[in-house]
Each structure stands twice: as structure tokens, then as C-alpha cells.
Amino acid sequence: LQPVESGGGLVQPGGSLRVSCAASGFTLDYVPIAWFLQAPGKEREGISCISPSGSTTNYADSVKGRFTISRDNDEKIVYLQMNSLKSDDTAIYYCAATYTTNIRTCALRASEYTYWGQGTQVTVSS
């Protein structure tokens, strides 16, 4: 299972961006997926996750109300819609996945995830 991120780029403060996490070739029915970010000089931070069924989503306080995570298991893809972006959101965004038997939960702890993408850069600047 190899997640692959895409959709990063440069956006102005207050703007929007959608990043994607694709996991082609694998069924996602038992795979919770999370997004983490890592800013320069800072530790990796979990910002959002979605359960395999899509019934549960969690968000860090820093992005709550601005970011929305969603998934399409048939298309094997997870999206993170980011609105009202701030300069503090500038970071490398990583997608992470693992296998589970509980399809209704997800966690924002990095230790819960086995498979990681290479990351996509998001820069918020005028």
C-alpha cells in the first residue's frame, strides 16, 4: 500500500487548495487515512483523518472549520479540501494509511500509521 499525494502548490492567504491521496491497486475498505503536515523546523502534526467507512472524521483544532476530509473508496482516493488558508499552513503535507478491523474510527497519531506518502508542498504566501 503506497499512498501518493498530489495537488500541492502556491496559494495566497485566504485562498483554497485541494490535495489528494491516491492508493491505486489496493482496496480501501479497511484503511483509515490521515493527513499530517510538517513545517520547517517543526515536528510532524496530524491534522485530519477519516475512518474506512467515512463515517468518522477528526480534525486538529488548528484546521477545524477550515479543512474538510473526504474519501471515495471506489476511486481509491482521499481528498483534503483546505479553505481560508493562512501562512501558518505552509508545510509539506503527508498522507498516511494503515490496515484496521475497525472501520468506524481513525486517529491523528503518527504511530498509528504504517504507510506514508512522499509528501506534497503547500505554500501560502502573497
Image (tube, helix red, strand yellow):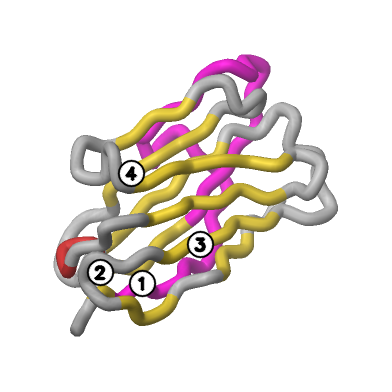
Above or below, 94 relative to 57: below
Residue 119 position within the rendered picture, expressed as x and y whole percent measured from the top left? 47, 67
Label 2: state its secondary structure: loop
Residue for badge 3: 19
Mark 4 or 3: in front is 3
The reply, left or right, for residue 102 in relation to residue 68 is right
Residue 41 position within the rendered picture, expressed as x and y whole percent measured from the top left? 15, 68
Badge 2: residue crowd in 10 Å (few <14, some 14–19, many ≥20): many
Badge 1: residue crowd in 10 Å (few <14, some 14–19, many ≥20): many
Circles 3 and 2 in contact, beta carbons < 8 Å: no
Query: Which image quarter is the C terminus in?
Result: bottom left
Above or below, 91 relative to 71: below
Q: Which residues are magenta?
A: 95-123
Circles 2 and 4 in contact, beta carbons < 8 Å: no
Mark 2: amino acid: Thr
- Nearest to the observer: residue 54 or residue 46: 54
Cα gap from disc 2 to disc 1, whole angstroms: 5 Å
Circles 1 and 3 in contact, beta carbons < 8 Å: yes
